[in-house]
Image: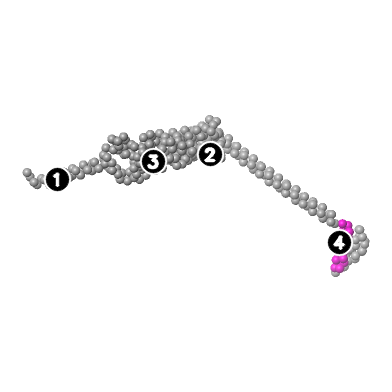
Amino acid sequence: MDTSSRPLKLVALVSGLFVALLVSWSSFTFTIPSGHAGLIFRTFSGGIDPTEAPIGQGFHFKAPWDRISVYEVRQKEVQQKLDLLSSNLLKIQLDMTVFHEPVIEDLGLLELERGRGYEEMVIIPSMRSVSREIFAKYLPEEINTSKREEIQNGIEERLREKLAANYIQLNDVLIRNIRLPQTLEEAIERKLQQEQESLEYEFRLEKETKEAERKRIEAKGIRDFQEIVSEGISDELLRWKGIEATQKLAESPNSKVVVVGGGKDGLPIILGNN
């Protein structure tokens, strides 16, 4: 027997074992990427056990005959353009975005009952049904008023209930780009303009009313003042004031002639240079 061929055979054997190990390595190991979780389908043990906790990210071992289902458990979003009807059967169009993620503790139930296509099977139909249910309670002209927040809250509440029943967590709902029929939008705009003009007219009317009231109060004050002053002035007071004024003028250096008792009511008459 040629002993020189033994090392070659040994190398070939080791190489074969190494290749076999590499080929089979992926059959009993797996890696869960970040933001994901895994479920083990046990081929000979009843498949997926919904009570078993999902496998977290990282490197793991498994039996070669088992399979792994990987779910993304980060927040995701679904966008939809929806055509709805108001309470008076007018068409409303809008864009809706739903932010969601699977409930990790119920990932096994989600896989068994809905599968990885749960967005198409659960979320989108729920968005349509809930939005139709809520918008059918309102008139189109109420949508862009104070009712907007009420509508938003109603949709979010009902949608959260539906998704929770299907092992999905609702994080947020955005409603935007609400489009009403053009004729209705024009009618609403005219109505808002008329309301604005009415408010402006009421403001001007209130302003003029306050100004008239101010003038009435001012006139009353002047009248009361005049009455008080007139009651306090008598003929004797006026004559006395006239005498005081005459005395001051008589004492001034200007040349003049003062006729005492020559005026009306006995008041002095003052004659100057002219």
Residue 104: % across, % down: 39, 41
Q: Label 1 sits on what residue type? A: Leu
Please tell me which of labels 2 and 4 falls first in the chain.
2
Q: Which residue is mark 1?
A: 10
Distance from the alpha carbon under mark 3 to that under mark 4: 105 Å
Contact (CB < 8 A) between labels 3 and 4?
A: no
Q: Is residue 177 visible?
A: no
Contact (CB < 8 A) between labels 2 and 4?
A: no
- Marks 1, 3: nearer the viewer: 3
Q: Residue at x 84, y 54 (%)?
A: 231
Q: Which residue is mark 2?
A: 150
Q: Which residue is mark 4?
A: 241
Residue 77: % across, % down: 42, 40
Q: Is residue 99 above or below residue 133?
A: below
Secondary structure, mark 4, is helix
Please tell me which of labels 3 and 4 falls first in the chain.
3
Q: Is residue 146 visible?
A: yes
Label disc, if present, on residue 105 of the rendered structure:
3
Q: Label 4 sits on what residue type? A: Lys
Report the magenta stretch's main SS.
helix
Distance from the alpha carbon under mark 1 to that under mark 3: 51 Å
